[in-house]
Image (cartoon, helix red, strand yellow):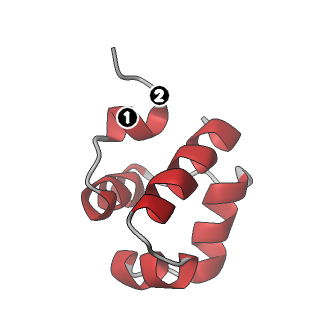
Amino acid sequence: MGEALGKRVRAYRKLKHLTQQELANLLGVSVAIVGGIERGTREPSQDILTKISHVLGVSTDELTGNHV
């Protein structure tokens, strides 16, 4: 997933007009975690991935690239 996931998270975050800090606040994590996910250097847990999908209004499959 890594870098591709990070690019999708960043793109959807920007579509929602959220900063990394705002997304981090909504997820209950640090901005460093959001930054790491977006850079592809940090793999989110399933729980965080689910929270990201809810906040950004997309499915986890869409975020991970597993959509058909």
Q: Is residue 35 above or below residue 53?
A: below
Q: Residue at x 29, y 46 (%)?
A: 58
Secondary element at image label 2: loop
Q: Residue at x 47, y 28 (%)?
A: 65
Instruction: Tell me which corner region of the image, top left, top right, bottom left or bottom right, holds residue 51.
Output: bottom left
Looking at the picture, tell me which residue is in the foreground, 43 or 57. Answer: 57
The residues tagged by marks 2 and 1 sit, at their Cα atoms, a distance apart of 5 Å
Quadrant including the C terminus:
top left
Q: Viewed as shown, does residue 59 lie left or right of 32? A: left
* Circle number at residue 65: 2
Q: Residue at x 40, y 60 (%)?
A: 48
Q: Viewed as shown, does residue 26 lie left or right of 41? A: left
- Number of numbered tags placed on the structure image: 2
> Is disc 2 in contact with disc 1, using a CB cutoff of under 8 Å?
yes
Q: Give the image location of residue 56, x and y in percent.
A: 33, 59
Instruction: Tell me which corner region of the image, top left, top right, bottom left or bottom right, holds residue 2.
Output: top right
Q: Give the image location of residue 21, x and y in percent.
A: 53, 84
Provide the residue designation for mark 1. Answer: 62
Q: Residue at x 32, y 53 (%)?
A: 53
Q: Is residue 67 above or below residue 20?
A: above
Looking at the picture, tell me which residue is in the foreground, 52 or 58. Answer: 58
Q: Is residue 34 above or below residue 39?
A: below
The amino acid pointed to by label 2 is Gly
Quadrant including the N terminus:
top right
